[in-house]
Image (cartoon, grey):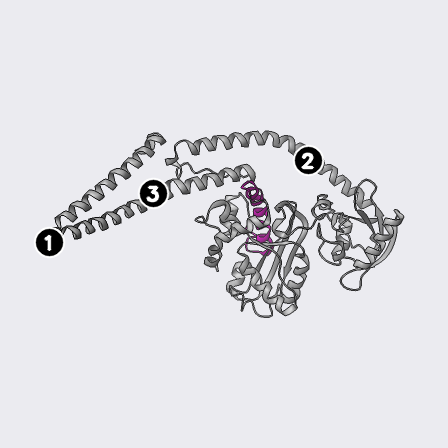
Amino acid sequence: MLVGLSLRLRIFLLFAGVAATSCAVVGAALYFGYTRIPETNAASGFILAGLLSTFGLLAISVSIWLLFDENVAKPVQQLSAAIRTRTHADVEASIDLQSAKYLGDLAPAAQAVTGRLTDEVAGVGDLVADATAQLAAEREQLALLLTEIPVAIVLVSPAHKIMLYDGQAADILGQVHVPRLSASIFDYFAEDEILGAYEKLKELRTEVAVKAKGTRGNLNFQLRLKKLSQASGYMILIDDATARFAPEAPRPLIYDFDATQHFETEKAIEQQLLKDLSFVVFDTETTGLMPNKDEIVQIGAVRVVNGRIIPGETVDQLVNPGRPIPAASTGVHRITDDMVADAPDPVTATSDFHVFAKDAVIVAHNAPFDMAFLQRYGHMSGHVWDHPILDTVLLSAIVFGAEQEHTLDALCTRLDIEIPEALRHTALGDAQATAEALCKLLPILTSRGFETFGKVVEQTRKYGRLLKDMN
């Protein structure tokens, strides 16, 4: 009935009702206190009336707060989250008009504005899509041309961070470890040998040949360092004799030229912008739900650099837990004893993952559970897991409010992320979904003024109880 009235009239009626009810409570309390005077005395009657008035007014205040919270505060929070999600994450988030029915025309107006914005973006998006398709085609053509050159190519920034690598280089780097954009080149080749050749390169300003050892195993690589004429940094050329590249294999060209700027000045992690950070988003499948007793059976991870998921930079590793996998756990993640028979043990697998996660912010959904396993294995291997950590449960709470459901499925539904059924409850599938959620949450957080890692962590501390409830 009240919905048909104007918002200003409804607010007036609310306050009028509060005033009338308060007067009625005080009047009733005074009358009751007055009737008790003959049995006691005037002072006792007034004290009783005062107590009854106090409790009555408190009850009115609590009732008004509950009504305001349910019909104003929560709808406003949900409405603002939906607007930011539609605007900054390119998601068709629905606006619940029913829950915001007491906010007057605010929700329909927000829907109209965001709908118009979506239409405008769609029009611009068509132009951007055409330009993007053309760029993608040109990049694919460039990648094909590069594969015709009998050397693998890696571009390195002045800070010795990898800016670009082609498919052949990915294969060669992969013989040492999973290739990682923005990673130090010294994670793959011996630092002293690369630095020695680099110093010669700066003096001679020409091509410098060097035989460099890989940082793992007994691999040796014949490299050539070449100065870039129109850009800062240098190029590493690797003879493809060491490549194991199948002719029909995909040959991506992976790059991030912003890496030349990300590392020019070192800042404390708290001061670094979210867009400048590298993230490793991971998930585990386990034999059970007790990190102090159970074991990992699978690790999945992807890397996010410059706000985008980097194709090919993934971990999808089965792990031999050294014990039978319970049937109930297999029923969830579909990993059997036979599948992990030849897989590395948990300490070895997590040690390899430690290298993959070097110099990155670790991200997980309900991170304390997964990190507890890594910490336990780290004590065995000597690896220290002191990486900065973000939890998408807490990021979801910042954006959508603590009272919402924050499971991975619920978060993906709100952000219009589809998890293929075949990949759900696989480590890599859940890590991929979490990474997609992270990529959509980051611009929303930035739009709210939480543009640095420190500001985001400060906000997550307000919702720590959510993780305690989940674990």
Q: Is residue 9 left or right of residue 35?
A: right
Identify the amino acid type marked 1: Glu
Q: Are marks 1 and 3 in contact (CB under 8 Å)?
A: no
Q: Secondary structure at mark 2?
A: helix
Q: For the magenta stretch, what is the residue range?
A: 421-449
Kindly give the residue lying farthest to the left in the view shown: 38
Give the residue pinned by disc 2.
133
Which residue does the image show at 64% across and 30% down from the upper left?
A: 127
- Dot 3 or dot 2: first in sequence order is 3
Question: Which residue is the site of mark 3?
Answer: 67
Distance from disc 3 to disc 2, alpha carbons, whole Å, reads: 51 Å
Q: Nearer the viewer, mark 3 or mark 2?
A: 3
Q: Element under label 1? A: loop
Label 3: few (<14), some or many (≥20) within 10 Å? few
Q: Residue 263 appears at what percent x and percent y? A: 71, 49
Residue at position x 66%, y 60% in the image: 354
Query: Considering only order in the chain, which callout, 3 or 1, is on the residue closer to the N terminus?
Result: 1
Q: Residue 39, labelled with which disc?
A: 1
